[in-house]
Amino acid sequence: MLLSLYPDATDRANEKSAADKTLDHAATPTIVHLDALGRTFMTIANDGAQLLNNRIELDVKGNQLTVRDADTQASDTQGRVVMRYTYNIPGSKIHQVSMEAGARWMLDDIDGKTIRSWDSRGHRFTTTYDTLRRPQLQFVTGTTASSDPRTLGRNLQVDKMEYGESLPTAQSIALNLRTRVYRHSDTAGITTNARFDQNGNPKDAYDYKGNLLCTTRRLLSDHSAVPDWSSAPLLRQETLKAGRCTMRLIALYKWWHRTAH
């Protein structure tokens, strides 16, 4: 069989070596246990040598309260607690603590959208929303000695969402951008859901069904800096593209959707 698939001796040896290395994982399925309501409360992983139990404790509403791994400490046979959550009466998460990320606290508005959050390093996050209650801006401020020194005493706008309504009405309608994300500025740079022509004008954002046609990305010039999008951070000159960013592919995609659907 291998001889017919891989006539070259070197390729055949490499494939056999790769197959031999997977033998340790043979007959090692993951087992999931469900409660009477169909909710996962225990997952058993098999590494070939032992069974590793991961448990989830739920409240009466089905919200996760704790997550435990297979590491039993201090004679706790249920496993080590690696995540713990707290909820308010409506069921929104207001506190979580984990081994990797530490503690976080969240405050929601009357609509259940997070407007303030804090972490155990003293960072304060503020999120604002537009009139349609869509995320718009996020700010971070460092308040303690444990905070990132680049954020201390500053109110940095680290995230910004711009929607199609920010463009002229005729243009946003032509690009099918109404109610959809047009530009997202984050700590890595700017992502734009459109292709640009030689004059820098946006083209081919979404088709009439709402399918994204093209995404362009420009990265920050200084990747180690924390950007403040209330000003204009420097960007690298090159533009990265993803999706159907050529005219031929866009035209083919539009034709296919109109004829196949």
Image (spheres, rainbow, N blue to C red):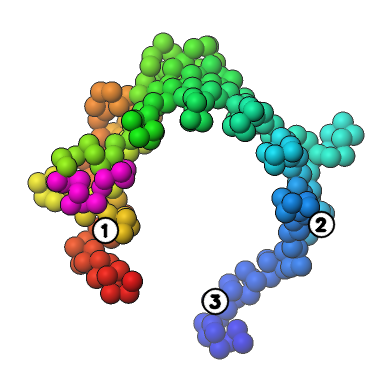
Q: Identify the secondary structure beneath mark 2.
A: loop
Q: Is residue 217 visible?
A: no
User: Which stretch did the figure color magenta?
Assistant: 170-181
Question: In the image, which is nearer the foreground, mark 2 or mark 1?
Answer: 1
Residue matched to label 3: 10
For mark 2, what is the residue? 49
Residue type, numbered disc 1:
Asp
Residue 249, given in percent of the width and then of the height, sits at 24, 66
Q: Which mark is residue 207?
A: 1
Residue lying furthest left: 199
Q: Position of residue 38 (x, y in %)?
A: 72, 54
Residue depicted at x 63% and y 75%:
16
- Vertical position of residue 27 compared to residue 220: above or below: below
Using the image as rendered, state which of residue 5 and residue 252 is in the foreground. Answer: 252
> Was residue 179 drawn as part of the magenta stretch in this picture?
yes
Q: Secondary structure at mark 1?
A: loop
Amino acid type assigned to the residue bearing label 3 in the image: Thr
Mark 3 and mark 1 lie on one chain; the one further toward the N terminus is 3
